Amino acid sequence: MAAGKGTRLKSKHPKVLHEIGGKPILSHVIAAAKKVVPASDIFVIIGHEADRVREAVAGAGVNFVVQAEQRGTGHALMVAREALSGNQQGNKYDQVIVLSGDAPLITAETIKVLSGFHSAQKATMTLLSADLDNPFGYGRVIRKGKATNAEVLAIVEEKSATTQQTKIREINSGFYAFDAAALYDNIDKLSTANPHGEYYLTDMAGVFHRARKKVAAIKTHNASEILGSNTRAEMMVLDAQVRLAKCRALLDQGVTVFYPHTCVIDSDVEVGADTIIEPFVQLLGSTKIGADCRIRSYSVIENSSIADGVIVRPGTIMEDSRVGAGAVIGPYSHLRPGSDVGEGAHVGNFVETKKMKLGKGSKANHLSYLGDAEIGEGVNIGAGTITCNYDGVNKNKTVMEDGVFIGSDSTLVAPIRIGRGAYVAAASCITEDVPADALALGRARQSIKEGWAKEKREARKEKRS
Ligand code: UD1
Ligand code: CA
């Protein structure tokens, strides 16, 4: 179920697209579901901002059911009737498992336990419950007696609960297993006679109980798995939990993460063994980092791939880029999208790159801008070198062939090609191609005025006296 608006978030974005661990909440739930059943058996009920939600999770290969008007969780299942119960020839599915699209910590294991317990109990409806110290806001589970496995009589929502009922700590998680046929034979018995005027799926417990059908509940031991994200405060708690769990998983895989509370590591990030992640590092999106790397403090690396043995020095910003094995980046380098740094290459202080390929062993160590450039192997780029790639209309390309040496403070006006092994003298402005093995000088010739400074000084002294 992912059709709701998420009013309590006060957001223009649909609730299920808010991110936990750098990934939409709904994507977490779908990922867990996909470990239980094939994507073709998953139906995502969308409604509020349906197109945006559909687009965000389209890659998962799941089906969608549109609940155009959101009239409650019961109504969401009514709308899914055709998709889930098939045609007159009979039911498509024996069991329907319902997941809340706003509870991202649910695991495949717990869904399997719920489903298995439901079958073993031969129940018509089974809900996943949990004991919470602070059950406020959740539906409470009303059982027939105190036994752990006592039958469920009803679920009572916070707003409808009596003072006595609000004291119940066992809450409804919003995850259920149903007998599909029974669900759709009885779902029309739901009514909107409640404080929200909605069809509550939770009321199916009472409906089945009255129809003398068994309603069971299984309590999860890991209550944090079922936490919902109805408010920003709840999201903050979940996000911290997901990220800490991610750090723990990395530690288990042989990665060192110092001060994990200060790091922001998204769920899908991969890191190889013996890599060290220093405090205040952000690894975002689909970033992949190899083994034996060191990612130093204050670096922000997004959707990038870094090979083994790379050192990323402090304050490096990297986005949609690739770095080859043994390269050294930073401090304070800015690798913008499309940067591809070769094996053993160096990109140093205050060097900005964009759509640039830097060959094996090449070095740009200080204060440069390298954009729309194809740079060969063993190239040395002096401090302050600038590729003038933009003429106000087009982006033009700079090519530096293998073994080129660019003297400091040179400007290379693209489109331009510096031939294999050529030298560019420091402070040159290069506007024409340089042939291989040549020296290009593009600056005014120096002239000397002997004694000029001394004469000036003496003239000043005379004036004062
Ligand atoms: C629901 C349960 C409550 C339970 C809690 C657990 C009901 C009536 N109450 O409350 O007992 O303790 O979950 O987190 O079910 N949705 C739709 N269509 C709708 C309404 C909601 O798809 O018309 C989706 C929402 O997008 C959300 C999920 O269903 O992903 C749950 O809805 P929400 O409004 O968050 O229910 P809760 O108030 O949390
Ligand atoms: Ca909720």
Image (spheres, rainbow, N blue to C red):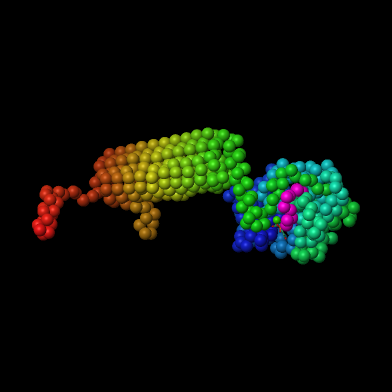
Q: Up-down: is 71 above or below 104?
A: below
Q: Up-down: is 110 above or below 52?
A: above
Residue 229 in view of the camera: yes
Residue 249 point in image, percent of width and height: 61, 39
Q: Residue furthest right?
A: 212
**Magenta-span inclusion, residue 193:** no
Residue 26 point in image, percent of width and height: 65, 52
Count up the numbered dots: 0
Who's the residue at 60% across and 44% down the image? 244
Residue 16, by quadrant, is bottom right
Who's the residue at 81% across and 65% down the image? 193
Give the residues drawn in magenta, as a range.
129-138
Who's the residue at 28% across and 41% down the image? 423
Magenta span dominant secondary structure: loop
Residue 210 in the figure: left or right of residue 407? right
Residue 79 in view of the camera: no
Residue 256 in the figure: left or right of residue 130? left
Residue 454 point in image, percent of width and height: 12, 51
Residue 393 point in image, percent of width and height: 38, 59
